[in-house]
Image (spheres, rainbow, N blue to C red):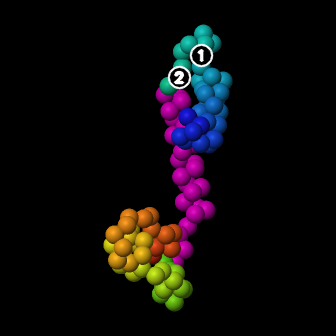
Amino acid sequence: MMMTNGIGAVLGSSISGQVIERYFTAADGQTKDWHGIWLSFAAYALVIAVLFAIFFKQNAAPTAKSGVINSVPNRNPRDCWRGRRGRGRLTAPSFATMLHRVA
């Protein structure tokens, strides 16, 4: 799991397993309160979504005067996968070209 999803997924699954064992497992050690588990983690996801909406607001759209659009050499989206214009070799687009396609 570490190789594909990273340290965040490993820590998240480990911590959530400890939370489930501590707060949502009955005294017999086998029975789990799945309704409570799902509600608690759904509430956690809701809190994270609200915090994300508050702290990560999108700025105004870039204009031609800001230099973002004018700094991109390839303006045709079909040309960005060819590397230099006219060559048939497929290469990944540069980061600036991808920004241009988003803007």
Residue pointed to by mark 1: 26
Question: Do callouts 2 and 1 mark residues in contact (Cβ within 8 Å)?
Answer: yes
Give neighbour class at mark 2: few <14, some 14-19, many 20+ (Cα, 10 Å).
few
Q: What residue type is disc 1 on? A: Ala
Q: State the image coordinates of residue 92 (x, y, percent, origin top left).
A: 44, 64
61 left or right, relative to 19: left
Dot 2 corresponds to which residue? 33
Residue 34 — which label? none
Q: Residue at x 54, y 15 (%)?
A: 31
Residue 69 against residue 50 in the figure, above or below: below
**Three-letter code, disc 2:** Asp
SS class, disc 1:
loop
Q: Going 54% across and 45% down the picture, which residue do you hit? A: 45
Report x, y in % for residue 94: 49, 69
The secondary structure making up most of the magenta span is helix
Category of crowding for the residue at label 1, using alpha-carbon neighbours closer than 10 angstroms: few (below 14), some (14–19), many (at least 20): few
User: Toward which corner of the image does residue 100 lie, by quadrant?
Assistant: bottom left
